[in-house]
Image (spheres, rainbow, N blue to C red):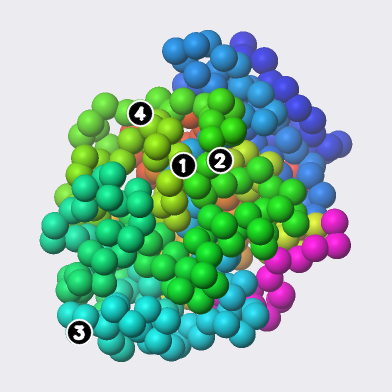
Amino acid sequence: MTPVHGQVAPRFEPVRDAFAANFAHQREVGAALCVYQHGRPVVDLWGGIADLDSGAHWQSDTLTYVFSTTKGITATCAHLLVQRGLLDLDAPVARYWAEFAAESKAEIPVRSLLSHRAGLTALDTPVPLAAALDWHPMITALAAQRPAWTPGTAHGYHAQTFGWLVGEVVRRITGRTVGAFLAAEIAEPLGLDFHIGLPASHEPRVGRLILPPPATDPDDAPTLRRASAVTTPPIDPNDPKVHAAEIPSSNGIGTAHAIARLYAALIGEVDTMRVLSRATLATALRPQSEGPDLTLGFPTRFALGYALPSQAFPLLGPGSFGHGGRGGSVGCAHPPTGITVGYVMNRLSHGVTTDTRFANLAAAIKACL
């Protein structure tokens, strides 16, 4: 049996059992789970091995690369600008980023970037990885890219480009990168151990991901592969150079506790701080895209930067919102019960719709309510 460390509040003991069962029956290697209810932690667990090469054990402060779970956090940065009156969701992106108007994109509104409706899922010519990690070459390529479909008429998951598109709007408005804005305006005030653009001093705490063999993901449609292949060579999530860069769609690095705490501060107060007002959050959660996804090949549901529950990604069920990441990580909230969850792990699943680890945890959490 893999030892499980941490604490659970009374009546949440079954969540510890479910977390331990993932190690025993679901081939979990290293993982952490945190649950907040009404702004207070009720579950904070971790266990297993953080790095198979060194044998290092998972600690309470082990950091994990969480792929697209990052998108919900990047979206939060954008909505904070909306709340401050600095960003208009219905304004053309070109109002903030003039070069974006090229190739018939002058009328695309900001909300299309957040709802995966801009048609900019891929690049005709991928950007060299080293250049993409420097930010500006990728921004130049996206500004020059023609949409793959008439923007606003359909949706397709912008797997990698989402972060650069939304992030450049944030940068044009604030003069700061998404990572710098997140750190100063959200992470530091809330005490979140979460980073987009990891400082070198934190690199020793990062667990090493266990990647699945190539071409084994049953959900890996050709359109998804193309949407993910915007750099050459592909992005290596275990590369410290990738950790240090900012890819706001997918290279967030943090703890399960930080993710759960952030979502708790979206739906209520955490230590007297609330990130988004009720009105701002209500706007952010209005459904924008529902039905067939041109990238993933199955139906998805999105609000403005946050995923909504669907058959493929049920999150915490009706009324919840959040975002998951490649391999299984999840950050989400269920406002009716005041529950928020952060789950991170290092063994990536083979399929986003076949991995049951988070579903097992979600079922246990809901049973405790």
- Answer above or below: position of 219 versus 307: above
**Can you tell which of label 1 and label 3 is closer to the viewer?**
1
Query: Is 138 displayed left or right of 319 in the figure?
Result: left
Q: Mark 4 points at which residue?
A: 211
Using the image, tell me which numbered label, if any, was put on residue 199: 2
On the image, the x and y values in percent for residue 46 come to 66, 27
Label 4 with label 2: CB-CB less than 8 Å: no
Q: Looking at the picture, which amino acid does disc 3 mark?
A: Ser
Estimate how packed mark 1 is, as few (under 14), some (14 to 19) or many (20 or more) residues with alpha carbons within 10 Å.
some
**Can you tell which of label 4 and label 3 is closer to the viewer?**
3
Span highlighted in magenta in the image: 271-286
Q: Earlier in the sequence, mark 1 or mark 3?
A: 3
Estimate how packed mark 3 is, as few (under 14), some (14 to 19) or many (20 or more) residues with alpha carbons within 10 Å.
some
Q: Earlier in the sequence, mark 1 or mark 4?
A: 4
Estimate how packed mark 2 is, as few (under 14), some (14 to 19) or many (20 or more) residues with alpha carbons within 10 Å.
few
Q: Looking at the picture, which amino acid does disc 1 mark?
A: Ala
Q: Distance between the residues labelled 3 and 2?
A: 38 Å
Using the image, tell me which numbered label, if any, was put on residue 109: none
Query: Is 291 displayed left or right of 193 in the figure?
Result: left
Q: Mark 3 points at which residue?
A: 104
Label 1 with label 3: CB-CB less than 8 Å: no
Q: Residue at x 44, y 51 (%)?
A: 246
Q: What element carries label 3?
A: loop
Q: Which residue is drawn at 37% across and 78% down?
A: 97
Q: How many labels, in total?
A: 4
On the image, the x and y values in percent for residue 154 come to 27, 75
Label 2 with label 1: CB-CB less than 8 Å: yes
The answer to which of 163 and 307 lies nearer the viewer is 163
Q: What element carries label 1?
A: helix
**Can you tell which of label 4 and label 2 is closer to the viewer?**
2
